[in-house]
């Protein structure tokens, strides 16, 4: 027994009605999947971050702890932690 599969709107399938006259059919209704909307707020946040980081140099992260230590001590901002 050969299976024929037609998929489309009712109007598109109805155009084949003559081919299937007198035959047994099984009709499955496929619900439309809701269209997913992009997360516009998230995308805008990513765009802003990319714009801010545009001219920043990339680092490998090896000096991250030292940079944090210096920042917390005020050294990076021109403060002398010894005085």
Image (cartoon, rainbow, N blue to C red):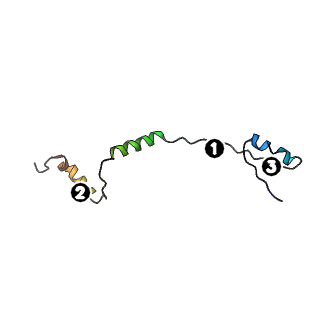
Give the Cα separation between the discs numbered 1 and 2: 51 Å
Q: Position of residue 1 (x, y in %)?
A: 84, 59
Q: Determine the residue positioned at 42% across, 40% down.
A: 44
Pointer 2: residues within 10 angstroms few (<14), some, or many (20+)?
few
Q: CA distance from mark 3 to mark 2?
A: 70 Å
Q: Position of residue 38 (x, y in %)?
A: 51, 42
Instruction: Name the secondary structure under disc 2.
Output: helix
Residue at the right extreme?
22
Front residue of 5/29: it is: 5
Which sits earlier in the primary sequence, circle 1 or circle 2?
1
Please tell me whether mark 1 sits on a helix, a strand or a loop.
Answer: loop
Query: Which mark, by number, is residue 26?
Result: 3
Point out the frontmost of discs 3 and 2: 3
Residue occupying image coordinates x 56% and y 42%: 36
Sequence-wise first label, 1 or 3: 3
Q: Which residue is mark 2?
A: 66
Name the residue at 38% across, 42% down. Answer: 48
Q: Which residue corresponds to mark 1?
A: 33
Image position of 65 with respect to 13: above or below: below
State the CA–CA distance, disc 1 to disc 3: 21 Å
């Amino acid at each position: 027994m050969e299976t024929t599969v037609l998929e489309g709107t009712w109007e598109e399938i109805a155009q084949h009605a003559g081919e299937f006259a007198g035959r047994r059919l099984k009709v499955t209704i496929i619900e439309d999947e809701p269209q997913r909307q992009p997360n516009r707020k998230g995308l805008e946040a990513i765009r802003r971050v990319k714009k801010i980081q545009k001219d920043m140099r990339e680092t490998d992260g090896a000096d991250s702890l030292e940079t944090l230590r210096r920042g917390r001590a005020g050294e990076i901002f021109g403060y002398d932690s010894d005085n």
